[in-house]
Image (cartoon, grey):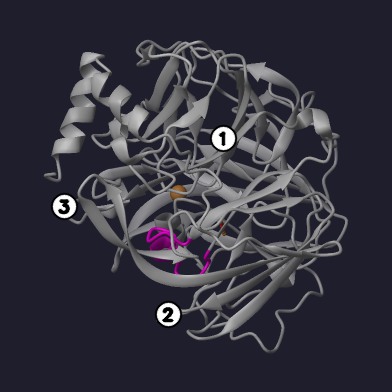
Amino acid sequence: MKKWMGWTIIILLLLGGAAYGLKESMNQRAEPLNNASGFKAPTTQGNEITYEIVAQQTQQEVAPGITLPVYTYNGSVPGQEIRVKMGQDVVVKLINKLQEPVTIHWHGYPVPNKMDGVPGLTQNAVQPGETFVYRFKASVPGTYWYHSHQSSSKQVDKGLYGALIVEESTEEERTTRDYTVLLDEMESGTSKGMGMMNSGYDIFTVNGKSGTLISPYEMKTGEKVRMRFINAGYSTHYLHFGSLAYQVIAVDGQSLQKPVAAQGKLLPVGAGERYDIEFIAPDTSIIGYDQLDHKAAAGMLIPLKNTDTDNVEVPKEYKGIFSLVDNDVETKRVSIASTAYDKTYTMELGHGMSMNGMVFTINGKTYPNIDKLGVKKGDRVKVELINNDPMNDHPMHLHGHEFQVLSKDGKSLEGKPVFKDTLLLKPGEKYEVAFVANNPGNWMFHCHQLQHAAAGMMTTVNYDGYPVSKEIDQAQNKE
Ligand code: C2O
Ligand code: CU
């Protein structure tokens, strides 16, 4: 098939509201990609669960007729899902078969600092042919992910990422269907554009596939379905599920006090963020998709396939955008808001030009010249985040901790604690967040549009008296 044919068909179908072609492809591809077999099962011994993850290069057909060279953890993009139970001791043996160094960072997971996977800060990069063993306890449940932190703007772009799911321990939280959905953008290399503006990204993927290659998510009328959305890309995606009566049940791995109904609303997922939704499968199939104003967005399909019926809905109208602030979101956490903080920092986000081109700045500076956030164990730290960049979303991510969102644009959220590890700031937005310094180490705090991070938008949180180990070569690229 010609490269653009599949696309044209999908776009025409969506615009025209006709779903015949998709219906057909939905019928042909019955296998959910989720938890795809073909991966080597983990081994367990007592309380310990061990995954072997091989970083390797391969080719993957990402859109009909378009096969790209990709980097993978265990042979596909996304990599093997690491799915463990609360309380297990997780062991991940990373074997590097690529020609360049890699690591694994556990995005959002409160691992000990030595296991955080940041080269030049928490470990030395894992060189070609080398092995590194990550160990941590599955101490909190929820939807997380893992990715390389070595030249991550390039390596994550090439596919070095996968899901980390820690299953709840209670029976009633399990659902009949539990799907993990990793969103990303890829470049076919055929369309030119500036990476910063994302215009070179012409293929939007769902679990590494686009358009009609995406495996439908199967369900039967009345079943309880959970979908875990993870944005492994650099753009914010606006998922549109049409009439689906869905509820948001978790944000960034944090369960909500009560599910929040979001029927008819677009679900915005910023880079690095996670949203878990739940719904009772309706008596029709629905072809959800990304409503982002971008030519490739129509290829980011979320085909919810009801295997009992031939009815298919293609979403059209929507009623607003789901928001943490306006939709009464509250995570199951105790507020850490205080009238007095031990440390207060401000991070003003912006962009500028340098001799080497576009830079992304915090307080007018680029890494490593940005002031670090010094803390000591036990501190309550407040950070004011201001997006003064008129053009760009900046999803800010803190390693090793979750922060509470205290306010947005002056509106307090303290009565309804929302904890996250990645916070999307749209142009002009201002948030206050706070975290308790309860995980000693040196931690990255950066924008998860990883090209922004590479172009300067990152800093570190450093605990007093926690030196970078002498064995670590601090000159290594931390991005
Ligand atoms: Cu997922 Cu430092 O990031
Ligand atoms: Cu950014």
For label 3, the residue is 192
Q: Earlier in the sequence, mark 3 or mark 2?
A: 2
- The amino acid type, in three-letter code, at marker 3 is Lys
Magenta span dominant secondary structure: loop
Ligand 1: image quarter: bottom right
- The amino acid type, in three-letter code, at marker 2 is Glu
For label 1, the residue is 430
Q: Which element is circle 1 on?
A: strand
Q: Position of residue 210 (x, y in %)?
A: 32, 41
Q: Earlier in the sequence, mark 3 or mark 1?
A: 3
Question: Seen in the image, is 280 located left or right of residue 142?
Answer: left
Compute the Cα span from label 3 to label 1: 33 Å
Compute the Cα span from label 3 to label 2: 26 Å
Q: Is residue 292 visible?
A: no
Q: Residues within 10 Å of mark 3 (few under 14, many from 20)?
A: few
User: Which region is colored magenta?
Assistant: 148-160
Residue 136 is inside the magenta segment: no
67 lies above or below 203: below
> Residue 100's mark?
2
Residue 158 is inside the magenta segment: yes
